[in-house]
């Protein structure tokens, strides 16, 4: 056991012992003494040391508990401390190992036992910036990771050697300060604090291994290279498929050449009968050699052919079709989900197939018109109808049918919208309408009930409290609606006059129900409009049939035993004042819009998204914990026709399941 682990173990044992004595012995004795009791007889003459011992042991317990955190904080503020270097080396080694284990080359090694050779190897002696060039899929990232492993091994043995860090340039944005962005990446990925990273960059204790320059726009690449030059760090390695590296003042170029036919034939022969289909296809189609120029193309095609002979459609299509045809999830769902995730990854400039949706502005314009029609012409009207029915039902049960009828008529004034979208299949929209109705009824009904309970409790307090609550709330609502102080005061006189006649109890009860339902309706409609604005379609007003849904709620309240109260003036006034809050809260709330936008992604990314991602990963459509194998694969999936590709998958699946199917199944 080394000194660090021994010290950590000793502190843990001391913390358990001291904390146990303090919490289990001294604290109960001190509480007993403080509440008038006597100390334990066993303490004898030492009872007078009870409070000093409690203070000292409590402070010692706190110090032992905070030791590691305070120590880490002090270490991060000292760039030269050896602990910073150990942590950075461990994190870099873990990251590089995860990238290597999840790469397509590792999948080939596991499934076929061979890996295409990528060369030449990069030198670990870096005097000038090194630029690794080659076409997409040539193996530049593989060389970069191999160099990182070699530099890590040297840095682990020699504390003077700089630490290599792999940085993906695709996450940089042109508006970001490159230095701050780089320090943020080092902190997030490798736990190198900005203070330490800044000192190490200045002292040239880092080797910067940049990947993903091609993910940036051409104009951004030139500016990014200018930022890299401004760092004035000679130990830089950059991978690129373009020629923007010529803007670097001094650089050494390492070209990665395409695979030769000899290498491809050796790889096929090394795999034995598992790639016989690929060998036959090469004999029949010599033009296929033009596509097998890179390790990526060979790897994708080899994974497609490993289960038997396949119908050749091009490297990328063959890879997707053959992999998806052997999955458990429906092909079209898999292809549509992968296309959706590929588009998000391309927009985010990375290779991550996210299991959780990012902010709606990233993906909202990817959804199709069919799901927009179901959302805005089925689910949203259904939710408003459910809200109106639930409101009138609650008002009828608690305040009487007269107040419920007035609330039903008042729903016509609720601000809402209908949306002009291409008509979809009505049969597929029925479930959306029913789901929206139930959701609107449950949420609005629950909030209205809660508001009614709160209003009833306030009504039981002295009348002055209820009177003041109604006055303040009605004034705020009136001013928020009119923005005219004099008109707001004039509107406030109405509930004041009603309370002078019937008292504040019924007004407060109705006000609670109206405020709850009005707040839900306003936030819902505001969120819908915010989502609609992201779709860039022109809305139109409408949906004046809400009183019919409210009448249904009144009828249900009557069936449930609600009566007609002879005096409903106070209840009606309270409900109407509360509902007047709806246009005030009809605002673009970001959180509400994010929540309402999620169902729009269901056609592209279903609820069982983890099953889809796991199936794609099992078939090597994704690698490395849900990442696309390469940006070439990502871009191909982002641009594919899901219906056409899914039909090819279904055709291939039928051929595999037939008794005379081609080749064994995976």
Image (cartoon, grey):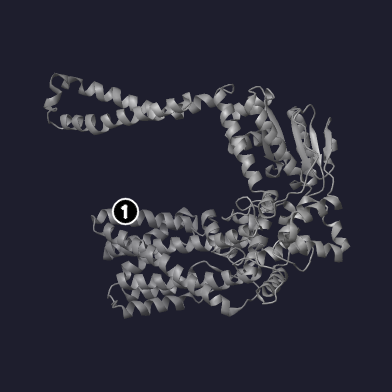
Q: Is residue 333 left or right of residue 639?
A: left
| Badge 1 element | helix
Q: Is residue 227 left or right of residue 397?
A: right
Residue 598 occupies which quadrant of the picture? bottom right
Is 311 in front, or is 83?
311
Is 80 in front, or is 518?
80
Can residue 410 be seen here? The reply is: no
Q: Is residue 388 placed above or below 138 in the rendered structure?
A: below
Pointer 1 residue: 468
Q: Residue at x 75, y 67 (%)?
A: 310
Residue extending farthest right: 286
Residue 639 occupies which quadrant of the picture? bottom right
Q: Position of residue 413 (x, y in %)?
A: 48, 69
Q: Residue at x 79, y 26 (%)?
A: 127
Q: Is residue 133 placed above or below 666 in the rendered structure?
A: above
Q: Position of residue 303 (x, y in %)?
A: 71, 58
Residue 100 occupies which quadrant of the picture? top right
């Amino acid at each position: 056991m080394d000194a660090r682990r021994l010290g950590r173990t000793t502190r843990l044992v001391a913390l358990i012992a001291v904390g146990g004595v303090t919490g289990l012995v001294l604290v109960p004795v001190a509480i007993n003494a403080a509440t008038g009791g006597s100390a334990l007889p066993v303490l004898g003459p030492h009872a007078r040391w009870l409070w000093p011992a409690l203070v000292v042991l409590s402070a010692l317990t706190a110090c032992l508990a905070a030791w590691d955190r305070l120590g880490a904080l002090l270490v991060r503020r000292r760039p030269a401390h050896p602990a910073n270097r150990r942590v950075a080396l461990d994190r870099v080694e873990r990251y590089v190992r995860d990238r290597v284990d999840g790469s397509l080359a590792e999948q080939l090694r596991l499934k076929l036992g061979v890996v295409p050779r990528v060369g030449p190897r990069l030198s670990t002696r870096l005097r000038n910036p090194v630029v690794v060039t080659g076409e997409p899929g040539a193996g530049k990232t593989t060389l970069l990771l191999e160099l990182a492993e070699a530099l890590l091994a040297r840095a682990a043995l020699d504390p003077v050697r700089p630490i290599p860090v792999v940085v993906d340039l695709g996450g940089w944005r042109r508006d970001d300060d490159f230095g701050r962005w780089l320090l943020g990446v080092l902190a997030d990925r490798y736990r190198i604090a900005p203070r330490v990273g800044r000192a190490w960059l200045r002292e040239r204790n880092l080797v910067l291994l940049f990947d993903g320059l091609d993910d940036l726009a051409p104009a951004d690449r030139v500016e990014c290279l200018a930022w890299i030059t401004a760092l004035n760090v000679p130990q830089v390695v950059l991978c690129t498929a373009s020629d923007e590296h010529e803007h670097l003042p001094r650089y050494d170029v390492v070209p990665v050449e395409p695979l030769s036919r000899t290498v491809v034939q050796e790889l096929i022969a090394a795999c034995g009968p598992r790639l016989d289909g690929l060998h036959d296809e090469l004999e029949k189609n010599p033009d296929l050699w033009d596509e097998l120029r890179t390790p990526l193309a060979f790897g994708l095609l080899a994974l497609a052919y490993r289960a038997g002979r396949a119908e050749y459609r091009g490297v990328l299509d063959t890879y997707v079709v053959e992999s998806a045809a052997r999955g458990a999830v429906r092909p079209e769902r898999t292809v549509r989900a992968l296309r959706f995730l590929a588009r998000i990854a391309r927009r985010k400039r990375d290779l991550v197939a996210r299991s959780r949706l990012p902010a709606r502005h990233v993906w909202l314009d990817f959804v199709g018109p069919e799901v927009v029609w179901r959302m805005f012409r089925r689910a949203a009207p259904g939710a408003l109808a459910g809200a109106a029915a639930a409101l009138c039902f609650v008002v009828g049960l608690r305040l009487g049918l007269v107040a419920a009828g007035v609330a039903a008529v008042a729903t016509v004034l609720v601000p809402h919208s209908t949306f002009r979208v291409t008509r979809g299949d009505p049969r597929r929209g029925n479930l959306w309408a029913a789901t929206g109705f139930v959701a609107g009824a449950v949420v609005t009904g629950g909030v209205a009930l809660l508001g009614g309970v709160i209003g009833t409790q306030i009504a039981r307090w002295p009348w002055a409290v209820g009177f003041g609550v109604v006055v303040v709330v009605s004034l705020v609502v009136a001013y928020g609606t009119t923005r005219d102080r004099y008109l707001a005061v004039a509107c406030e006189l109405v509930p004041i006059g009603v309370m002078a006649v019937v008292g504040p109890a019924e007004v407060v009860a109705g006000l609670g129900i109206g405020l709850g339902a009005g707040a839900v309706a306003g936030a819902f409609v505001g969120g819908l409009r915010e989502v609609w604005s992201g779709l860039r379609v022109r809305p139109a007003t409408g949906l004046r049939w809400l009183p019919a849904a409210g009448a249904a709620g009144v009828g249900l309240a009557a069936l449930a035993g609600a009566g007609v109260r002879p005096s409903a003036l106070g209840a009606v006034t309270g409900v109407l004042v509360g509902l007047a809050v709806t246009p005030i809260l009809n605002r673009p709330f970001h959180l509400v819009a994010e929540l309402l936008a999620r169902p729009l992604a269901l056609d592209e990314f279903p609820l069982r998204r983890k099953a889809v991602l796991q199936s794609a990963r099992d078939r090597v459509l994704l690698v490395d914990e849900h990442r696309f194998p390469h940006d070439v694969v990502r871009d191909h999936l982002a641009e594919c026709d899901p219906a056409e590709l899914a039909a090819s998958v279904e055709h291939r699946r039928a051929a595999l399941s037939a008794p005379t199917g081609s080749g064994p199944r995976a």
